[in-house]
Structure formats: C-alpha cells, structure tokens
Amino acid sequence: MEAVLFFGAAIGALGGAIGVVAMRNPFYSVLALIVHLFSLAVLFLLLSSAFVAAAQVVVYAGAVMVLYVFVVAYVGGGEESAWEPIPGQQFLAPLLGIALFVELAIAILASSLLALGTHGPDVKTGFGDPAAIGYLLLEKFLLPFEASSILLLLAAVGAIVLAARRDEVGSDSSGSRSRGVPAEPDPTSSAWAPGAGSPGTPRDSEPGDPAPGTHPHPGEGVPAQ
Amino acid sequence: MNIEWYIVLSSLLFAVGAMGILIRRSPVVILLCLELMLNAGNLALVAFSRMVGNQQGQVFALVVMVIAACEVVVGLGLIVAIFRRKLPLDVDELRELRG
C-alpha cells in the first residue's frame, strides 16, 4: 500500500516537474506545478509529517499558485520566441541536467549513511503533527520564526514598491484621469522592442505635465484595482 | 519505502528544475523552476528528518517555504514592473546589466 502510494505520488511529482519545463504556455506550466505540489504533499504525508503537508497544500498550492495564476493572466502567456542566443542550448541544457542528477545519485549511493536504506526509526503517533511542530517553532526556534515573519513583511513591502505604478503616473500627461483605469493591454505590447517606451521617452517633458508640486501621490493608483 | 527512494526522487526533481532554468527564457517559468528546486530541497529535508526521527528538519522545511514565498512575491513584483515598462519578458533580451 505504501509502495503504491509512493510510486503514484512520485510519478505525479515527476510528471508535474517535467510538465513545468516542457509546456510552452506558462499557464499550463503553473497548472503542472500545482499537480507537482499536491503529489509532494502526499509524499510528505508518507514521511509522517502532517503539518508540513498541510502547509504545502494551503500555502503553496493555495496562496502562491493563485499569485502565479494572476500574474500569468496579467502579463499574458506569450509563447517563447524560437531565437536561441546560445546555439545548441536546447540540447546542452538536458545534458547538464542529466549530469547533475548523475552527480547527485553518486553522492547519495556512495554516502556512508547506513540509515538511508531503512525506513527510519519507529516514531510515536504525534510525530510531525501541528502540536509538535508548533511547540518547536515557538519554543526552540522562536528567533528564526520571528526573523522569517519580518522577512515576509519586508518582501510584501518590497513587492508593493516594485510593482506600484509610480513612473507611469508621473510621466503620463493625462495621468490624472486615466490613473484609476487598470492597466489595459497596451496595443503596442505586441511589438515589444528593447528600449521602446523605456523611462527616457520624450513624453517625460510634455508641456501638459502636471506641475511637480501636484505630483500625484503614489498610493492612489493602487487600490483602484 | 526506504529513505533512499525519497532522496533519489528529490535529486531527480532538483535536476529537472535546474534543467528548466537552463532551457526556458520566460522569467515566469524560471521562477516556477526555482520553485521546483526549492521543493526538491524540502523533500530531502523532510526525508532526512524522518530518517533521523527528529522533527527539526520539518521546521527547516517550513522556513524554506517562507523563503520561497518571499522569493515568489519579489520575483513576481519584478515581472509586473518589467511588463509595465513594456520591456520584453525574455531573460536573454534583458541583458543591460551584463556589461
């Protein structure tokens, strides 16, 4: 029974991983990653770590993947161009991947960890359940726990600073009226060229620009979405 | 199942993720492949934690999940910023910092 579950989940995880790499459309890649994450949660359950499995499903397959789906829907799942800057990249990269796997497999199989060939010791029923992990997090690893919460806060603030539409608002002469409109797919976006519309375009100095004193405050465009 | 199986599967997933980073050129997919590699590390951590019979490896795996969430948030913010400036979403064309 355990072997059936393991091989089923392993095939799911591996298939999901290969699907992420092989799908041409980024949206399907995200869906393949969701399959991969659910299979990994099954593997975590098999390793008797219930809380990590639950966190995997809730945090990863729930929250993070929703973020990915939104961003892929926003930027559009464009196909990659066939242009290859490094000739033979599509053939060299799998070779390097296989070499990496062979190296890791040699490292594992040649290691002197005798316990690798066992199931691990018998554990009590409470092994890896939320009570035990919560006790560890709040008693023994309190400092890393708090540090990771500060890190999450920093990442959230950094993402808001990065993705806020400051410069478009500042350089757009009609920005005061079109600011509330969520960024519609630009008609020029199909003809992307490096440098087109980069922050040095002459629109910066248009006479209709609002005076610098009336610079729109940056928080205004964000909640309108 | 022996712990060995989990570790071999984890290294296989890690290799697939690394291969994806080398092959793909869309920043979104590269972030997805980074997720694959981080999850492979998580699987190895949890497997070793089961092998030793100690739950501290699971706490480590949870911290790795937090790091992955932070990386995703910042990376996706960067992608949205790149998209807003109408730059190409292709890591081979965004090469101004390469010198």
Image (spheres, coloured by chain):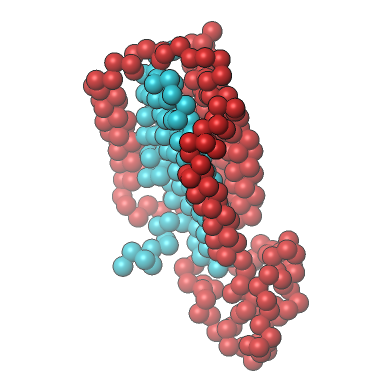
Chain colours: A red, B cyan
State left or right for residue A8 relative to residue A98.
Answer: right
Depth order, front residue of B89/B5 = B5
In the displayed structure, A151 sits above or below A20; it is below
Residue extending farthest to the front is A139
In the displayed structure, A78 sits above or below A10; it is below
Depth order, front residue of B80/A111 = A111
Q: Residue A61, position in %: x, y?
A: 61, 36
In the displayed structure, A212 sits above or below A90; it is below
Residue B35 seen anywhere in this rendered image of the structure: no
- Residue A29 lies in what quarter of the image? top right
Q: Which residue is drawn at 33% across and 36% down?
A: A97
Residue A110 seen anywhere in this rendered image of the structure: yes
Q: Residue at x 67, y 76 (%)?
A: A217
- Residue B48 lies in what quarter of the image? top left
State left or right for residue A74 relative to residue B60.
Answer: right
Q: Residue A136, position in %: x, y?
A: 51, 32
State left or right for residue A65 relative to residue A105.
Answer: right
Q: Residue A193, position in %: x, y?
A: 49, 67
Q: Residue A155, position in %: x, y?
A: 54, 55
Depth order, front residue of B84/B67 = B67
The N terminus of chain B - image quarter: top left
